[in-house]
Amino acid sequence: LFASPRGSAPTAYDRLYTIPVDGGAATVLPAYMGFRGAFSPDGQRIVVDRVDRWDTEFRSYRGGQNTPLTITGVADGAESALPNERTMDVDPVWDGETIYFLSDRDWATNVWAYDTRTRAVRQLTRFRDAEVKALDGRDGALVFEQDGWLWTMEPGRGEPRRLAIHARGDFPWAMPRWADVSRSVAAAAIGPTGKLVKDAAPTEIYTVPVEKGD
């Protein structure tokens, strides 16, 4: 599944296409506009976010870029919109009978859920200090970004859990290395025995033998 403006000249807007994993021609889906989407488990329907936003950081925006998420039949193009009052509803994820999505309908973007059987909408997270972003998930688990951290949650099985991520790498700027700092010495003092000199260069203090050694 991908979005492309390839067939929308002269004014560019995205539509959704599918293409076989093992190769072949792309097929356009019935949704007349589509920036992002997620298939139902049986592949017969797709929930579509129609437009991209030019400013995703515009908090509590209620303008014309906000369009409701729309459930579209893949075969017949029949549409039904999720409840929406000019809120920014984005990043749909379809898992089982539930569509999860991000919405700022409580004036801060949080994770919400829509039951496709009862048409009920409920709020799953209640962050206030920073917006929830980049929702994804499958098999009953969700992952999202909030305040620079990655969080996971299993709806109905407890509160969101912030992941503890430890990035390890070579970090060449932090590796021990040889450097000539003789022109950067700011102060010096001779040790009590006269065999060592202590130098202070920017951000570092060194001991230097008078003879032999480093």
Image (tube, rainbow, N blue to C red):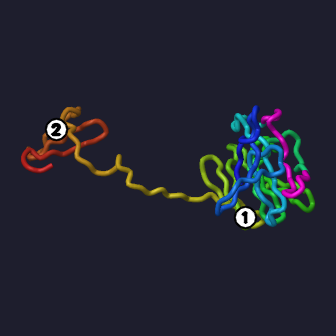
Q: Does 17 appear above or below 6?
A: below
What is the crowding at mark 1: few (fewer than 14 residues within 10 Å), some, or many (at least 20)?
some
Kind of element beneath mark 1: loop
What is the crowding at mark 2: few (fewer than 14 residues within 10 Å), some, or many (at least 20)?
few
Identity, as a three-letter code, of the amino acid under mark 1: Glu
Magenta stretch, main secondary structure, is: loop
Q: In which quarter of the image is residue 5?
A: top right
Residue 206 image point, x, y percent: 22, 44
Q: Residue at x 80, y 61 (%)?
A: 40
Residue 183 left/right relative to 213:
right
Q: Residue at x 77, y 63 (%)?
A: 95
Magenta stretch: give its range. 61-79
> In this view of the protein, can residue 138 be seen by the observer?
yes
Residue 211 image point, x, y percent: 6, 47
Residue identified by numbered label 1? 154
Tell me the distance, in whole angstroms, between the alpha carbons under discs 1 and 2.
62 Å
Magenta residue check for 117: no
User: Comparing marks 1 and 2, which lies closer to the viewer?
Assistant: 1
State the mark number for residue 195: none
Q: As rendered, which of 15 and 138 lies closer to the eye?
A: 15
Residue identified by numbered label 2? 189
Identity, as a three-letter code, of the amino acid under mark 2: Ala
Magenta residue check for 69: yes
Question: Which residue extends farthest front?
Answer: 24
Looking at the rendered structure, the number of numbered marks drawn on it comes to 2
Residue 20 left/right relative to 122:
left
> In this view of the protein, can residue 110 be seen by the observer?
no
Q: Does 194 appear above or below 47?
A: above
Q: As rendered, which of 49 and 29 lies closer to the eye?
A: 29
Q: Residue at x 91, y 62 (%)?
A: 117
Q: Earlier in the sequence, mark 1 or mark 2?
A: 1
